[in-house]
Amino acid sequence: MAGSDTLEEAPARPTPQPIIKSADMSEEMQKVAIQVATEAMAAENAEEKDIAAYIKKDFDKRYGPTWHAVVGKNYGSYCTHETGNFLYWYMGNIAILLFKAG
């Protein structure tokens, strides 16, 4: 998946349930974010940076620039975001931070 906007389907595997930790985003956008993340995580050999790039590019196309996505297991963050454009959640043991700024 590295450097690609397309996904290579991997064999079906259980999808972790999303756990929302903090949200300043409409329910509809949250559903889209979770669906896009699920698609990215299902790709064969998906790495965290690839998942982040896929989510960011998708949201830039859907909602206009400038979105930022951080995906990983061990990081801290402190960011400023546009009102109504922030979501922080877990998919299994992977944390995802998605926000619009700029």
Image (cartoon, rainbow, N blue to C red):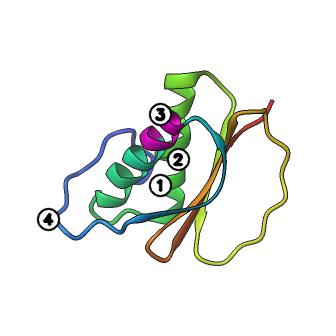
Q: Report the disc number at residue 50.
A: 1
Q: Report the disc number at residue 28.
A: 3
Q: Earlier in the sequence, mark 3 or mark 4?
A: 4
Residue type marked 3: Glu
Secondary structure at badge 1 equals helix
Q: Which of marks 3 and 1 is nearer the N terminus?
A: 3
Left or right of 28? Residue 9 is left
Q: Are marks 1 and 2 in contact (CB under 8 Å)?
A: yes
Magenta stretch prevailing secondary structure: helix
Q: Residue at x 47, y 34 (%)?
A: 28
Q: Residue at x 78, y 33 (%)?
A: 82
Q: How far apart are marks 1 and 2 (CA)?
A: 5 Å
Query: What residue sits right under mark 4 in the picture?
Result: 11
Residue type marked 2: Ala
Part of the protein shown in magenta: 27-32
Relative image position of residue 43 (x, y in whole percent): 29, 57
Relative image position of residue 29 (x, y in whole percent): 51, 35
Query: What residue sits right under mark 2 in the picture?
Result: 53
Residue type marked 1: Asp
Q: Residue furthest front?
A: 27
Quarter-of-image position of residue 44: bottom left
